[in-house]
């Protein structure tokens, strides 16, 4: 690929929808350089094996002073990869998000999770424990059972839907294509092949270093699972307990 610019991409996802898993999967491809949350307010989360290079106060201050210049350096630092990308969540760098959405040369991967209750539960557990990422060397962690009210789940679901609807509207107005992906499909070989084809890359099995943090049944993660199940019965959100 000498003389050819790498394919640029961004993963757009609400928190706890499997974006670390997707970054880890894509990063296992030898032709992909996939960063994580480059615009997290608390840090610059690059490719896993390069975290120490970016974990400085000066680097964070420089990023925040000139975020688009920082992004341009990320695009240029391909290190031989054919595709370079990162992920963004709704609460990060709105100016950068607008810039990326307006750039038709950036491929958009739109990641969603089918079960908003599991997504919200995961977010609350991560907030309580402080662990937002877990990889294959992560030690066991004690986790609290969390409480979710029906109106909280409905509000959360509406907020996630609004984030994705806003992105869809921008892309529709500008005539851009995108690739919708579901968290639940990420280990499917056909889905992985579709992802790689979208980025113009040769197919190969992908592997992950990311560890699922809350695989237990919801009854073990929720303090009020029975009451919430009853409250959601017969509503559009009843499927979250399937």
Image (cartoon, rainbow, N blue to C red):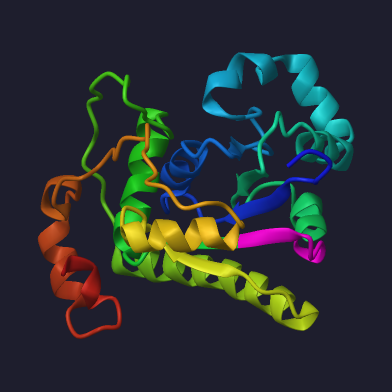
Query: Dividing the image into 4 quarters, which one contains the C terminus?
Result: bottom left
The residue stretch that appears in magenta: 101-108
Q: Is residue 97 left or right of residue 178?
A: right
Q: Is residue 135 left or right of residue 94?
A: left
Q: Is residue 171 above or below residue 5?
A: below
**Percent position (x, y) of residue 52?**
61, 14
Q: Is residue 104 magenta?
A: yes
Q: Is residue 31 left or right of residue 149?
A: right
Q: Is residue 232 left or right of residue 130?
A: left
Of all residues shown, which one is farthest toward the bottom?
234
The image quadrant of residue 138 is top left
Query: Dividing the image into 4 quarters, which one contains the N terminus?
Result: top right
Residue drawn at x 67%, y 52% is 9
Q: Is residue 221 above or below residue 166?
A: above
Q: Is residue 203 above or below residue 226?
A: above
The one of 125 and 175 positioned closer to us in this rendering: 175
Residue drawn at x 30%, y 82% is 236
The image quadrant of residue 57 is top right
Q: Is residue 93 magenta?
A: no
Residue drawn at x 68%, y 60% is 107
The one of 67 and 143 positioned closer to us in this rendering: 67
**Percent position (x, y) of residue 202?**
52, 51
Q: Is residue 99 above or below residue 2?
A: below
């Amino acid at each position: 690929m000498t003389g050819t610019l790498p394919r640029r991409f961004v993963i757009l996802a609400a928190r706890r929808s499997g974006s670390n898993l997707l970054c880890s999967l894509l990063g296992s491809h030898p032709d992909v350089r996939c960063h994580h949350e480059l615009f997290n307010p608390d840090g610059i989360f690059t490719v896993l094996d390069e975290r120490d290079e970016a974990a400085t106060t000066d680097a964070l201050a420089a990023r925040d002073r000139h975020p688009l210049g920082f992004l341009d350096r990320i695009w240029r630092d391909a290190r031989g990869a054919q595709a370079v990308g990162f992920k963004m969540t709704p609460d990060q760098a709105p100016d950068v998000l607008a810039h990326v959405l307006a750039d038709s040369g950036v491929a958009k991967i739109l990641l969603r999770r089918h079960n908003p209750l599991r997504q919200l539960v995961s977010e609350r557990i991560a907030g309580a424990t402080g662990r937002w990422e877990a990889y294959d060397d992560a030690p066991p962690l004690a986790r609290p059972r969390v409480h979710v009210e029906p109106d909280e789940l409905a509000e959360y679901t509406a907020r996630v839907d609004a984030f994705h609807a806003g992105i869809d509207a921008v892309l529709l107005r500008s005539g851009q294509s995108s690739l919708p992906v579901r968290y639940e499909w990420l280990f499917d070989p056909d889905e992985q092949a579709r992802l790689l084809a979208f980025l113009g890359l040769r197919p190969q099995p992908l592997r992950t270093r990311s560890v699922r943090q809350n695989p237990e049944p919801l009854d073990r993660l929720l303090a009020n699972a029975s009451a919430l199940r009853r409250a959601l019965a017969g509503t559009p959100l009843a499927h979250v307990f399937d």
